[in-house]
Image: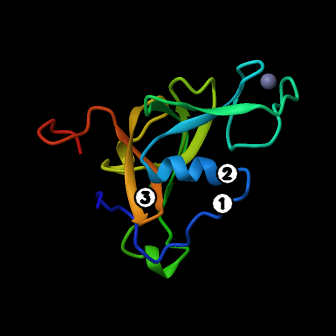
Amino acid sequence: MTARWFPDDMPVPAASAETVGWWEEAARHRLVVQRCTACGRTRHPPGPRCPACRGDAWEFAPLPGTGTVYTYTVVHKAFLPALVDTVPYVVAAVELDGGGGTRLVSNVVDVDPHDVRVGLAVEVVWEDMGPELALPRFRPLAAGPGTGVR
Ligand SMILES: [Zn+2]
């Protein structure tokens, strides 16, 4: 089991026919981006057709798992009872390294919310929410045991 930052009884994301493959990769702790095999354009969330060339052939390309905070907000109000003990927490759009400009809305964890900044370098950490669901969260790149960074 991985580290946990959010409670078990949070609502889980809904997968669609177009996104289920992305969630299956995530369940294996693999951060990927959908890439058009005709022109190379990346896109997220996954969709059936390339917005650049209209091609319908694609693949999931592996990403290094690092990125930068593009924008963020700090949530102070628990909109769900399950989150009363979790606030404040950070919701961020993370621009993914190697993702061709794609951004992933996620959370920045293991950090004082007041220390999050636009441009903060982050890396993915996985939170297993169940046997078939893992959610990518991000923590400051320098974070880790012994670094002095929370
Ligand atoms: Zn294309």
* Residue 89: mark: 3
Number of labelled discs? 3
Asked which quadrant contains residue 53, the reply is top right
Tell me the quarter of the image containing the C terminus.
Answer: top left
Name the amino acid, label 2.
Thr
Q: Nearer the viewer, residue 53 or 114?
A: 53
Vertical arrangement, residue 105 with respect to residue 52, above or below: below
What is the C-alpha distance between the residues marked 2 and 3?
26 Å
Asked which quadrant contains residue 48, the reply is top right
Q: Which of 34 and 123 is in front in this view?
A: 34
**Residue shown at 43% from the left, 28% from the top:** 64
Pointer 2: what residue? 19
Pointer 1: what residue? 15
The reply to whether dot 1 and dot 2 touch (C-beta < 8 Å) is: yes
Neighbour class for label 2 at 10 Å: few (<14), some, many (≥20)? some
The disc, 2 or 3, on the residue closer to the chain's N-terminal end is 2
Residue 136 spot, x, y in % from top left: 46, 49
Vertical arrangement, residue 107 with respect to residue 119, above or below: below
The reply to whether dot 2 and dot 3 touch (C-beta < 8 Å) is: no
Left-right relation of 74 to 60? left
Left-right relation of 50 to 141? right
Extreme-bottom residue of the structure: 81
